[in-house]
Amino acid sequence: MADHPRAPIALLTSQVHRLHKNINTRLQPTSDADITSVELEAIGDELHAMATRLFPICRSVTGDGVRETLQIMQESIPLDIVEVPTGTEVFDWVVPHEWNIRDAYVKNSAGKRVIDFRQSNLHLVNGSQPVQQSLTWGELKKKIHSIQSQPERIPFITCFHKDDWGFCISQTRYEELEALGEQTYEVVIDSVIKEGSLTYGEYYLPGESSEEILFSAHICHPSLANDNLSGICIAILLANRLMQLPRRRYSYRFLFAPATIGAITWLAQNHNKLDQIKHGLVLSLLGDSGHSTYKRSRSGDAEIDQIVEHVLKTSGEPFSIRNFTPYGYDERQFCSPGINLSMGCLMRTPDSEFAEYHTSGDNLEFIEPAFLADSFNKCHRIIEIIENDYSFINLRPMGEPRLGKHGLYESLPADTDQKQFQQAVQWVLNLSDGDHSLFDIAVRSQMDFSVLLKSTCALVNCGLIAQQ
Ligand SMILES: [Zn+2]
């Protein structure tokens, strides 16, 4: 491809070819299965290690937990950290006071912590106002949350936008305390709520076109792994890989903001940039063992919807597609009527549909390297289509050309599936008529885009097709 005047289709494949071979190899073992499996494992391990490092931080809608998370992410990508002051009006909302937490506990009369924020940041209702008082068990238990149906798990509860506080414990722990009867406890929540700012991170990667692809992940949950960290870590690694490409067809923007108010703040402050956004994805819940789920954009038939659906359909694995609904993650904001971006949401098991959701069960054991790596690879395949969807013209359109005569098979890698390659060549030759792009051909043929791309490269190299 190097001597092709525009050589656009090598853009991502030259860089990520090994990744794609990984997944193909995993599904259809070939001679170099060991090497590619190791590579895929390394990606999963890298993603899980990132999540492990970020897991203990007590993130919230605002405050130092978000800042610390973004600062660690800056080690991988040169993220801009943006502070928007408390009181700033953002559409129909106002940036809230900043919340920070130093410590929180409930002590018994012997001075022992019976509920301790230091053991799990989920023990404190996120956003709790400061408290220092003695309470009887009868008074205290009104402020305690547990889950009867999951007696060993601590629930994740928030109390933003209202002056309140509370603790979260397992039902088992609740019953132990209940059995101790009417004792008096010292309750301390050493939180600070003051004028400050809302913090978000943004990384813009310019490409040849000013049209942007937006990836967004929420960054406001404390120690929850699938819900927030899986999307954050995959977005970091995608940005890191894209950053290393010598050129990109499109520009990319990665947004890491607290859910709802963070996305609304970003949209309000960047309203003039929105018409640059071609389409994008909200990334969340990407590390559990469930199959991939795609929630379509508001229009339901945007280019991004078709691309993601094609990637899932040709993955050879189970998947589900859902229509847009005005609840879920920040697609609610990106797809609000006045914004109406072509943004879908890629996840595995959707929110509220797994028992671990918003509990201490959503931990580092719940997300697994293999599922993180699989989700990452699907994102990568989506980007491969976005970057390589060009149109070509068949230069020998009168009947089928004699392929061997043009040296089509001479430079093929030894592990090429000849039958699949041949079919892809025939599809590309037939539909490279000026009316169909490579992605149109992928949809029509229901063939893996990567295979069509490989055939297209070979056809360009031997002069049978040319980019339109
Ligand atoms: Zn959540």
Image (cartoon, rainbow, N blue to C red):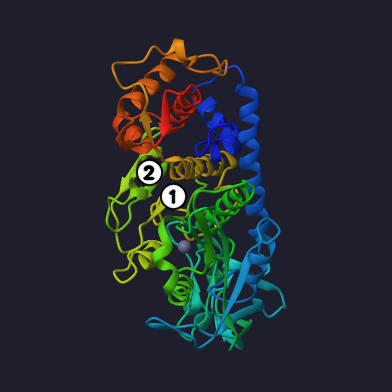
Query: Could you tell me which residue is drawn at 54 percent across and 20 percent down?
Result: 29
Q: Amino acid at mark 1?
A: Met
Q: Which residue is mark 2?
A: 307
C-alpha distance separating marks 2 and 1: 15 Å
Query: Mark 1 or mark 2, which is nearer the start of the sequence?
Result: 2
Q: Could you tell me residue 51's position as x and y percent?
A: 62, 53
Does the residue at mark 2 contact the one at mark 1 (Cβ under 8 Å)? no
Left or right side of 272 for 100: right
Front one among 170 and 392? 392
Q: Could you tell me residue 381's position as x and y percent?
A: 48, 40
Q: Could you tell me residue 413's position as x and y percent?
A: 57, 19
Front one among 85 and 417? 417
Q: Secondary structure at mark 1?
A: strand
Left or right side of 318 for 15: right
Viewer can see residue 368: yes
Q: Which residue is mark 1?
A: 347
Q: Could you tell me residue 165's position as x and y percent?
A: 52, 81
Front one among 422 and 183? 422
Mark 2 burial class by Cα count in 10 Å: few <14, some 14-19, many 20+: many
From what the image shows, is residue 190 above or below residue 21?
below
Mark 1 burial class by Cα count in 10 Å: few <14, some 14-19, many 20+: many
From what the image shows, is residue 289 above or below residue 448?
below
Q: Amino acid at mark 2?
A: Ile
CB at disc 1 and ligand 1 closer than 8 Å: no
Viewer can see residue 116: no
Query: Could you tell me which residue is drawn at 58 percent across and 49 percent down?
Result: 242
Residue 410 position by quadrant: top right
- Quadrant in the picture for the N terminus: top right
Task: Give the foreground label among 2 and 1.
Answer: 2
